[in-house]
Amino acid sequence: MDFGTYQTLLVEQRDEALLVTINQPASMNALAAAVVEDLHALTGVLADLGTDANWPVRGVIITGAGEKSFVAGANIVEMNTMDPAAALAYGKRMHEVTLRLEALPVPVIAAVNGFALGGGCELAMACDFLYASENASFGQPEVSLGLVPGFGGSVRLQQRVGIGMARELIYTGRRIKSAEALRIGLVNRVLEDPEALLEAALATVAEIASKAPTAVANVKDAINEIAGLNVVDGLEAEARSFVKAFETEDSVVGRAAFVAKTAPAFPGR
């Protein structure tokens, strides 16, 4: 399938995965306006594929080109020429990108090598989970510039690591390495190098691809909804998700295969 051609992105299908590489290594893949617009266009293409999990790929991997950086942050040179209205539009555009990533019916993995600072950390946190190389580093350094997170960091960092740790990292602008990010729950796995990082992300997509497509899409949607609810409301949302899954053809096939002790061939419906 043709996912489009982009000035700042490399997009290629790797078996069950769609690999999206932010390809601006000279600027350490900073989120310049052109990059944001390409990400917005690509996520629009993906959103238009629908939400029935009948996708040409079973996962999306986002990474950055070069050895130094996943995404070094927003483009501060460009931001320095913006007035408040333009800055707000810039931030809102990235909000649309990150919300689209969260709404996709397949998992999105951030494969982080090198810097994931400011907007880079925020883009990574909009993915379902983060894998990092040993040389990766994370942070929200906006206060050092008299700014605050503008692409979702104030929301998603506390969801990932808790409000106390999020406050400390945002107030100080501190940068942390991948080992510390793993300890506090910001990243899921730390791999030795970029090659191992990509291999691990592809292997996870392949593992997920063996599961029922509708179930994965359904539970991703449910987890996103439940994240902002109390226990009682969360259980109600889970119950709705369970019934929705139970009614799918994938569930019929999966349960029958379990009883028959055979491997299920999920139809994706």
Image (cartoon, grey):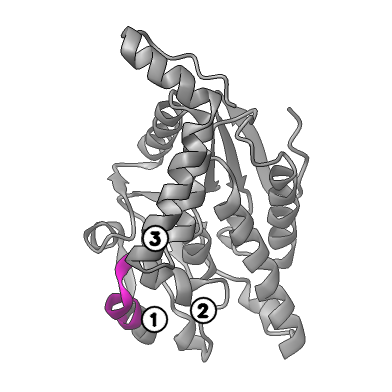
- Nearest to N terminus: mark 2 or mark 3: 2
Distance from Cα at disc 2 to Cα at disc 3: 28 Å
The amino acid beneath tag 2 is Pro
Image quadrant containing the C terminus: top right
Q: Is residue 202 above or below residue 175?
A: above
How dense is the environment of label 3, judged by Cα within 10 Å: few (below 14), some, or many (20 and up)? some
The mark that comes first in sequence, 1 or 3, is: 1
The vertical placement of 36 against 167, above or below, is above
- Label 1 with label 2: CB-CB less than 8 Å: yes
Instruction: Specify the principal SS of the magenta part.
Output: helix
| Pointer 1 local density, CA inside 10 Å: few below 14, some 14–19, many at least 20 | many
Numbered circle sitting on residue 149: 2
Tell me the SS state at disc 2: loop
Q: Residue at x 68, y 73 (%)?
A: 92
Give the left or right position of residue 9, taking residue 86 as reference.
Answer: left
Image location (x, y in percent) of residue 218: 51, 42
| Image side of residue 262 versus residue 252, left or right | left
- Please name the residue that numbered disc 1 is placed on: 170
Rendered location of residue 45, percent (x, y): 75, 44
